[in-house]
Amino acid sequence: ARIARLEALPAKARARLEDGRDLNAALVIGAEGRRSAVRAAMDVRLIQVDYEQTALVATLAHDRAHDGVAHQMFLPGGPVALLPLQGHRTCLVWSEKTAFAKSVLAQSPDVALREIRARIGAVLGEISLEGQLWSFPLSMALAETWVKSRLALAGDAAHAIHPIAGQGLNLGLRDAAALAETLRDARRSGADLGAETTLLRYQRWRRFDTATTAFACDAFNRLFSNAIAPVRLARRLGLAGVDAIGPLRRLAMQIAAGGAGDLPLLLRGEALAP
Ligand SMILES: Cc1cc2nc3c(=O)[nH]c(=O)nc-3n(C[C@H](O)[C@H](O)[C@H](O)COP(=O)(O)OP(=O)(O)OC[C@H]3O[C@@H](n4cnc5c(N)ncnc54)[C@H](O)[C@@H]3O)c2cc1C
């Protein structure tokens, strides 16, 4: 049953379900994605940016092996990512200006395939669509406050970001691990798991990392999704510089893989003992 009403009472959170039942808990975690009902109930302010881009997502079947290599093409309408799947299949994440994306969706799959071929060239050989094209409007939505007494947000419920650097899931995993560790420590010291003071440690741990990643992705998207000549030159020089300087390249790879910063135990591969 769906939650009809969520209340944060002094000693517990109470969810009233649409079928009339009440569920009580010390803490409710909103981890239900960018349209989080828990976030709506918390009534927090959102920092929002509409990218006026839509991601078209599909599975491509192809005759050339991808060899486990991912590709990203930076085009004026937005980045096009090819993410290898099992066998001769690849996930396409094609970000485009929304008006153009809508026109592609309104036409036959052959038109979409023609546009995809024009963007990715022959890197996968002959391609066909496996299933339909899905569409996701792209926006940033950062919750200013992640916790209140009895309530906490994690994952896209707290921070939806541009997918240009593939960081959304990484951030959510770090939230989950940091929240688990925060609650484990609170339980060890006999603290109230849903108290705002307990949850503020989690917010302090995760909010800065998330905001810097979100704004970095925002900046990358602005830098890479345009065709202005000096900007194109600057980004080519920047990428060549990062590629040429070994330590810088390794740092960029470590950040992209989610291995930098103050990592919770679970993301360092360590167990979270009770
Ligand atoms: C086009 C696109 C490409 C992306 N590419 C990447 C990438 O390459 N790498 C990367 O790291 N990230 C990527 N992301 C971001 C990534 O998908 C998200 O950051 C991630 O899925 C967020 O996980 P989540 O669990 O917080 O939310 P979600 O994945 O949205 O999951 C929330 C879940 O909660 C469920 N739910 C909702 N309401 C309720 C309810 N009331 N009760 C119970 N369940 C409920 C939903 O059904 C859903 O299953 C991409 C996003 C987009 C749009």
Image (cartoon, rainbow, N blue to C red):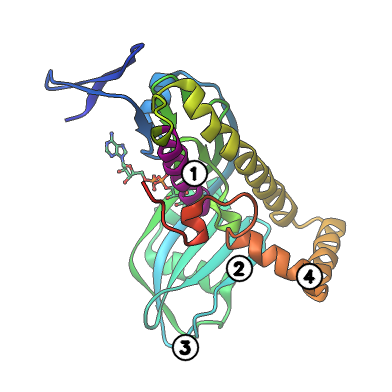
Point 53% across, 27% down: residue: 200
Q: Which mark is residue 64?
A: 3
Please give the residue where the numbered disc 1 appears in the rendered image: 178
| Residue type of the residue flagged with mark 2 | Gln
Q: Earlier in the sequence, mark 1 or mark 2?
A: 2
Q: CA distance from mark 4 to mark 1?
A: 28 Å
| Residue type of the residue flagged with mark 1 | Ala
Question: Is 219 or 226 nearer to us in this picture?
Answer: 219
Number of marks in the image?
4
Would you say the residues marked 3 and 1 are in contact, meaning their CB atoms lie under 8 Å apart? no
Q: Is residue 191 left or right of residue 209?
A: left
Please give the residue where the numbered disc 2 appears in the rendered image: 72
Q: Which residues fall within the magenta stretch?
A: 169-186
Give the x, y percent position of residue 176.
43, 45
* Label 3: which secondary element: loop
Tell me, yes or no, if residue 32 can be seen here.
yes
The magenta stretch spans residue 179:
yes
Point 58% across, 26% down: residue: 144
* Label 4: which secondary element: helix
